[in-house]
Image (spheres, rainbow, N blue to C red):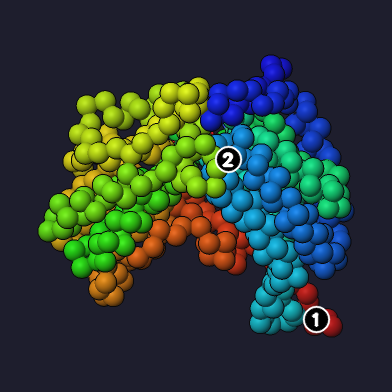
Amino acid sequence: MSALTVLNPATAQPIATLERADVAEVDAAVSRAVVAQRRWAALPPGARADALRAFARVVEEHVEELARIEVQNSGHPIGSARWEAAHVGQVLNYYAGAPERLLGAQIPVPGGIDVTFHEPYGVVGIIVPWNFPMTIASWGFAPALAAGNAVVLKPAELTPLTAIRLGELALEAGLPEGLFQVIVGSGSVVGQRFVSHPDVRKVVFTGSTEVGTEVAAGCARLLKPVTLELGGKSANIVFDDADLERAAAAAPGAVFDNAGQDCCARSRLLVQRSVYDRFLELLEPAVAAWRVGDPTRDDVDMGPLISAGHRDGVASFLDGANVAFRGSAPTGAEAGDGFWFAPAVVLAAPGDRIAQDEVFGPIVAVLPFDDEADAIRLANDTIYGLAGSIWTENLGRAVRVSRGVRSGVLSVNSHSSVRYWAPFGGMKASGLGRELGPDAAEHFTETKNVFYATDAS
Ligand code: TXE
């Protein structure tokens, strides 16, 4: 198998060389996971809860180290990377409460007692993309482990380093060998083997809609359940009754955070025509104030894109586009060979490529709308349905529009998408199933129904 060279996207310099696992190695890991899972599921619920709390504590003790690895490997600003590492600890703590709360039902039936049990699937395969390597991994492994499963996790080839460290920290925290294994390799080998291996009983995939569709098709052949978190083209809808200053100040963060490499990026900015010019006037200084630069610095909002190839793909969206204004990015010696890209604001029409396709970079398409019905129609005018924001001071309008937009995660007068207490996931081509929230551990179980006859005869 060929070696994998991991680069720092802010410098284009190599930071690690790793071997890609082959199918035999995946199979060996799954065999170990099968054994570990049986023992894990047989533990008292409180023991599993304690083990996950211990894992959370060890992650908390390593927040700074994990954050620094992520800055190097993914180019996330250090402030964001610290948040992400702390979030992994929080997600583990939250689902550490689940083993002792996986309640079944006792159903009234004649002639006996009917009880349901939430049985773990066994081994769960988790396939992670490069945009949020730690957090997305934790949304899968924390509830999956809590529900009594073992986990095999494949990070993206571009960003494997924090996942590898989390695998080591799990062992340091005392999680049994084989229960949580991180396997580095390519999607077509390791990821596909998760799909085709008969002992991997559920797959969680986050990535492109194209690959996710193939993963789902492969899982269907083995009747294997799958959770999909896929692309997005989310709308940020600004009504004329909104607090325009606040909405404009928040708009850059809603789409340029993580350099736009965010499935929830509000990459379409829909502005009511009556305030369109005023809003753009307010947006321009907000974009100019968005600080792009060395991600090791505390005062930076955005780092580089993940790779040279990805930057070429993002840049192609500006070919022939009507660019209203751009932010800045490092140049010259400061830029080095890093994969920088200055944020861009593009004036667009609904059918334009920039208004339909996921860019996954710091480009926002601005489109005017006339009234509430028009806003909802435009917001729904893509194949995706992941996130979105609605800016209005009118409560009735906030309720009507949030019910009308076909997206899984919406926020009103805010751009919040991920709060681990609440379910997260997309409609339409943005995905299948939900992660996070109070029910996530249950999603890693199958319901077993048992009838106990009590009649003597
Ligand atoms: O995703 P892929 P990529 C979108 C975004 C981005 C584009 C491509 O638009 O520009 O997808 O990104 C593994 N069987 N999103 O190429 O290929 C792969 O190794 C099983 C949006 O990184 O979908 C990686 O671990 N697994 C998205 C993961 O799947 C396979 C986040 C994702 O890779 C596989 C990421 C296969 N045949 C990208 N092929 C979001 N919206 O959050 C690849 N993989």
Q: Kindly identify which residue carries mark 2.
A: 296
Q: Position of residue 341 (x, y in %)?
A: 40, 32
Picture quadrant where residue 114 is located: bottom right
Residue 433, above or below 414: above
Residue 389, above or below 287: below
> In this view of the protein, which residue sits in the foreground, 161 or 358?
161
- Check disc 2: other Cα within 10 Å, few if <14, some if 14-19, many if 20+: some
- Please tell me which residue is depicted at 27% across the width and 41% down the height of the picture: 345
- Please tell me which residue is depicted at 75% across the width and 31% down the height of the picture: 26
- Check disc 1: other Cα within 10 Å, few if <14, some if 14-19, many if 20+: few
Q: Dots 2 and 1: beta carbons under 8 Å?
A: no
Picture quadrant where residue 376 is located: bottom left
- Please tell me which residue is depicted at 31% across the width and 30% down the height of the picture: 317
Q: Kindly identify which residue carries mark 1.
A: 454
Q: Residue 240 vs residue 212: left or right?
A: left
Residue 272, above or below 178: below
Q: Please, what is the three-letter code of the amino acid marked with disc 1? A: Thr
Q: Please, what is the three-letter code of the amino acid marked with disc 2? A: Thr
In this orientation, does residue 20 appear?
Answer: no
